[in-house]
């Protein structure tokens, strides 16, 4: 079983915080939820969360290529 790194834990915490913010803002203007409004809310949450995670994976990949191998 793999353990989560500190960055992954931070990403999870930020994702949960962002979900709370998005859900709070989505509930303010109207009380009647529709499927379309729910999909917009999900997109407002998933796109930034996935982008940040992908950016982090890209940084790890680039950093790994620049590390000097010690012998």
Image (spheres, rainbow, N blue to C red):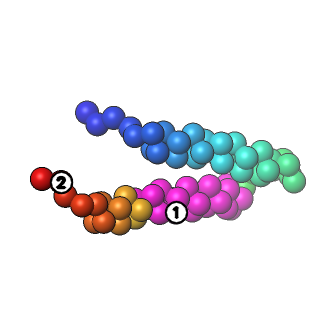
Q: How many marks?
A: 2
- Decide which of tag 2 and tag 1 comes sooner along the chain: 1
Q: CA distance from mark 2 to mark 1?
A: 33 Å
Examine the rendered structure and indicate whether residue 20 appears above or below residue 49.
above
Disc 2 crowd, CA 10 A, few/some/many (<14, 14-19, 20+): few
**6 in magenta:** no
In-image side of 21 versus 10 (left or right): right
| Residue 40: percent from left, percent from top | 67, 61
Q: Secondary structure at mark 1?
A: helix
Residue 34 visible in the shown view: yes
Q: Which residue is nearer to you in this view: 41 or 71?
A: 71
Quadrant, the N terminus: top left
Left/right of residue 33 with respect to residue 42 in the rendered view: right
Disc sitting over residue 16 in the figure: none
Quarter holding residue 36: bottom right
Query: Which mark is drawn over residue 70?
Result: 2
Q: Is residue 14 left or right of residue 66?
A: right
Residue situated in front as seen by the camera: 2 or 45? 2
Q: Is residue 61 visible?
A: no
Looking at the picture, does residue 3 appear above or below residue 28?
Answer: above
10, 20: nearer the viewer:
10
Q: Which residue is mark 1?
A: 51
Q: Which residues are magenta?
A: 35-57
Q: Position of residue 4 (x, y in %)?
A: 38, 38
What secondary structure is the magenta-colored segment mainly?
A: helix
Question: In this rendering, is residue 37 above or below 24?
Answer: below
Measuring 40% from the left and 64% from the top, which residue is drawn there?
A: 58
Q: Residue at x 40, y 40 (%)?
A: 5
């Amino acid at each position: 079983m793999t353990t989560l790194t500190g960055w992954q834990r931070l990403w999870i915490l930020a994702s949960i915080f962002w979900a709370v913010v998005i859900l709070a803002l989505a509930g303010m203007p109207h009380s009647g939820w529709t499927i379309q409004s729910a999909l917009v809310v999900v997109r407002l949450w998933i796109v930034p969360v996935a982008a940040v995670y992908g950016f982090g994976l890209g940084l790890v990949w680039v950093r790994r290529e620049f590390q000097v191998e010690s012998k």
